[in-house]
Image: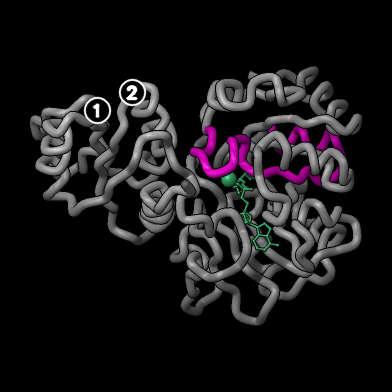
Amino acid sequence: MATTSDIEKAAGVLRAGGLVAFPTETVYGLGANAEDAAAVARVFQVKGRPPSHPLIVHIGGAQQLGDWVGDVPATARLLAECFWPGPLTLVLRRGRRVSLEATGGLETVAVRVPAHPVALALLSAFGGGVAAPSANRFGSVSPTTADHVRGELGDAVGFVLDGGPCEVGVESTIVDATGEIPSVLRPGGVTREDLEAVLSCPVAVHSTSRVRVPGQHPSHYAPRARVVLVEPEKVVAEAELAQELGHQVGVFLPPSLADAPVKAHAVVSVPSSMAAYARGLYGFLRDLDQQGCDLIVASLPVEEGLGLAIANRLRRAAGPRPS
Ligand code: TXA
Ligand code: MG
């Protein structure tokens, strides 16, 4: 676990233009000083991410929001008050302070206050904004432990702060708050229902819009193994057939089939609680890869609450891969 002196050291690395991987309540981030164009460019390089795909600027508190955005509409202020620190990212008009590298040249910027004591301590010790994507290679599964980060990015990161396993497990909900009516660009840790309760109106989810952002790539969040989605009642038959055909099959066994026997290479029992499922999701995908599965058979959860974010990640994991 990160100590106070680790946090001081990490803040020093950021000040010197280096990169720091740090825990948040959602997933681990790969951070750089948001005002340092060269440091931000290194983040893209280490991730192998195209420079046109914008990063999230992490700040220490809602009171700093005005420093990073052009203006703060009343709805954005309300959402920040209700959900920060927490798994909500607000897209707003860009302020001057943030480097254009971090926003991928867009006139908007994504900002959030993470709810993890180590992240907040780092932001407070550093004092500025930290531009950070998830600390994984472009297109692959996001890391939810410090070991995932070390395993995937290794020496390319100046410093990895260990804050234990992430509590939420899927990324933040991204809300476009530039207009009068906010909409969700990526479902995540704050549910649509949570947003609707605060805003007292229906909230649209546009996660398939044509905004040029990484979450839009069909095969984002993908493990090495190919992912196939079927109806829950077909999971066992589909897995056994593929196994018979010579695949090393990993199965996401839905809670309704908890004790069903299944002839496959590896089995994950999907938790019935959506919070536990979200927390475990990326670790399950990584484990099946590590066990040598080449095919993962899963079904989608009911798309309400956190189930919406889980289904979104599974669909993208199952999406067509770049050849
Ligand atoms: O939970 C999270 O959000 C994690 C932790 C580390 O904070 N971060 C994360 O970052 O998931 P990343 O880079 O993997 O995803 C950032 C997302 C992109 O998919 C992009 O869609 C969106 O942020 N984004 C960033 N700037 C944007 C903008 N100006 N307009 C629309 N979307 C934007
Ligand atoms: Mg990511």
- Give the quarter of the image for residue 60: top right
| Image quadrant where one finds the N terminus | top right
Nearer to us in this view, 302 or 124? 302
Q: Are marks 1 and 2 in contact (CB under 8 Å)?
A: yes
Residue visible at 60% across and 74% down?
182
Q: Is residue 201 visible?
A: yes
| Location of residue 16 in the rendering, given as x and y in whole percent from the top left corner | 91, 29
Label 2, secondary structure: give it. loop
Residue visible at 21% across and 38% down?
253
Residue visible at 86% across and 44% down?
128
The residue at the far bottom in this view is 180
- Give the quarter of the image for residue 282: top left
Q: How is the image coloured?
A: one colour
Q: Is residue 286 left or right of residue 268?
A: right
Give the extent of the magenta segment.
118-143
- What amino acid is at disc 2? Gly
Q: Is residue 279 left or right of residue 249?
A: right
Q: Is residue 259 magenta?
A: no
Residue 57 bears which disc, if any? none
Q: Which residue is mark 2?
A: 292
How packed mark 1 is, by other alpha carbons closer than 10 Å (few <14, some 14-19, many 20 or more), is: many
Nearer to us in this view, 172 or 273? 172
